[in-house]
Image (cartoon, grey):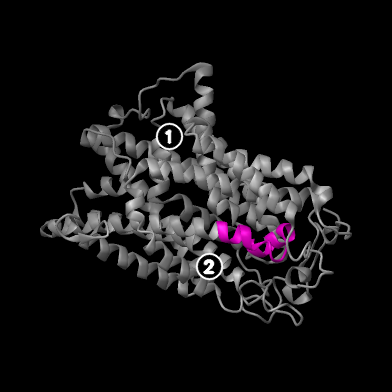
Amino acid sequence: MADVKRAPAEVAEAPGPRAGTGVVKPGYDPSLANEDLAPLGRQNWKSYNFFAFWMSDVHSVGGYVTAGSLFALGLAAWQVLIALLVGIVVVYLLCNLVARPSQETGTPYPVVSRVTFGVRGANVPAVIRGLIAVAWYGIQTYLASNSLVILALKLQPAWGPYAEVERHGFAGLSTLGWAAFGLMWVLQAVVFWRGMEAIRRFIDFCGPAVYVVMFALAAYLVVRAGPSNIDLNLGSITHTGWGAVGIMVTAVALVVSYFSGPMLNYGDFARYGRSMADVKRGNLLGLPLNFLVFALLVTVTASATVPVYGSMITDPVETVARLDSTTAVVLGCLTFVIATIGINIVANFVAPAFDFSHVSPQRISWRTGGMIAAVGSVLLTPWNLYNSPETIHYTLDVLGAFIGPLYGVLIADYYLVKRRAIVVDDLYTMSPRGRYHYRAGWNPVAVGAVVAGAALALVPVLSHHTTTATFSWFIGAGVGFAVYLLFRRSIPASADLTVVPGPR
């Protein structure tokens, strides 16, 4: 294990601060610390908590549709499953890398970024990740609220006119849509406001609950269709042999891009782990194993909709809405809504809460940072953004271009330059003698590497080279990683960390 200097009070089993609370030590600069950003006093998440985290992240309407869409790329079902498995294994390995510094120090992603970007420069990755999360928070809230609209119309068809924007709506959303969006907004805020322990308990429930519904839905459709009438190839096979390899690689890239947001700030959750072994075990169960089962369920369910309903349906809410039983429709839709709340909180609410708090710790608490993100998500009117598939695809590529280099630079610095050695107290000091002060609190090499990585990754995106743009995350991460190592000798003197890593 690398040398990470921490106070004795930060041992996982130590008494004192309650779980999830940071310890602000005397001497920490107020502009860099509060109870949300300080190293944890106790770390109590077990393997199951991380397993449940990934179940909540994967078992969503967006995850269902994304997995289902990959089966329509013109590949055989077994080829798509291999691509999905390879992609999720890549995500698993990358998550383990980014989790370690946060778990070992008990600090969230923006604080760990100070090691690389400097105590002030870390606001760059914090703000970028925070703004990205705000956009996706709004989109996921809209998707979940749309599920409520479908449910409302199923139960009360007379409300149909209020679901039409032209007749009863404003700012691009219908009256019924506004009501559903507002309800989802409040429900998510209530769960978030109760703190990380409440979020942990919520996601512990969400993932398994969706599995129950998905298994029941798949079994019902298979029985109605008849096993012999189900074709697991959801689209016509147009790519075979070596010609299919390129499409499979593209599918792998899409999987990594889909998880790039929560993967970057996974440290926000890994910091709560009792040990790195708990984190890895939870990641193994929640990513490769869980994702494979999920993908198989999606394939069977979507395939069965063809003989049952006459066309393939990749939206699970729409599939549930077509069931004959009103009770089944209500339970199914509510379960998917709850699952979407789970993924939205873990992927797009917690991240900006820490990120915005990091900008001004004494003025913005973790809860305040989250509410800033929630308000911003409404101002973006995400339903208008989501109405344009081209814009969504373009946005995904742009976000990947910025997230990639942030990841690449952090990994290059922590593992190859700092050799996993972190002095925690120096993360909270503005003293020029601090190891992470660099130049006035900024590491210009890290910022420059991110700019270079993002600039090159944006080239295929802005030139509308769709195939290459799909790999914007990989391009950005690779360039950022390489540029940072190339100019490592130009890092300001205060970056020289003389602490020798301990035994592994």
> In this picture, is 156 found above or below 228?
below
Q: Is residue 72 above or below residue 355?
A: above
- Residue 288 placement (x, y as % from top left): 55, 43
Q: What is the three-letter code of the residue carrying label 1?
A: Leu
Query: Which residue is drawn at the image coordinates 49% and 45% (left, top)?
Result: 258
Give the side of residue 205 with respect to residue 502, left or right. left
- Which residue corresponds to the image point at 57% horizontal and 78% vertical from the top-left? 363
Depth-wise, is mark 2 or mark 1 nearer the camera?
Answer: 2
The stretch of residues the image draws in magenta is: 109-128
Q: Which disc is residue 172 wearing? A: none
Q: Quadrant of residue 122?
A: bottom right
Magenta-span inclusion, residue 76: no
The residue drawn where x is 41% and y is 73% is 190
Residue hosting label 1:
70
Residue under pointer 2: 353
Pointer 2 and pointer 1: residues touching (CB < 8 Å)?
no
Task: Name the secondary structure under disc 1.
Answer: helix
Image label count: 2
Residue that extends furthest to the left in the rendered view of this protein: 158
Q: Residues within 10 Å of mark 1 (few under 14, many from 20)?
A: many
Residue 264 falls left or right of residue 165 = right
**Is residue 466 shown to the viewer in this render?**
yes
Disc 2 secondary structure class: helix
Question: On the picture, is 231 further left or further right than 410?
Answer: left
Quadrant of the frame with the N terminus: bottom right
Horizontal and vertical percent position of residue 328: 24, 54
Q: Amino acid at mark 2?
A: Ala
Magenta stretch secondary structure, dominant? helix
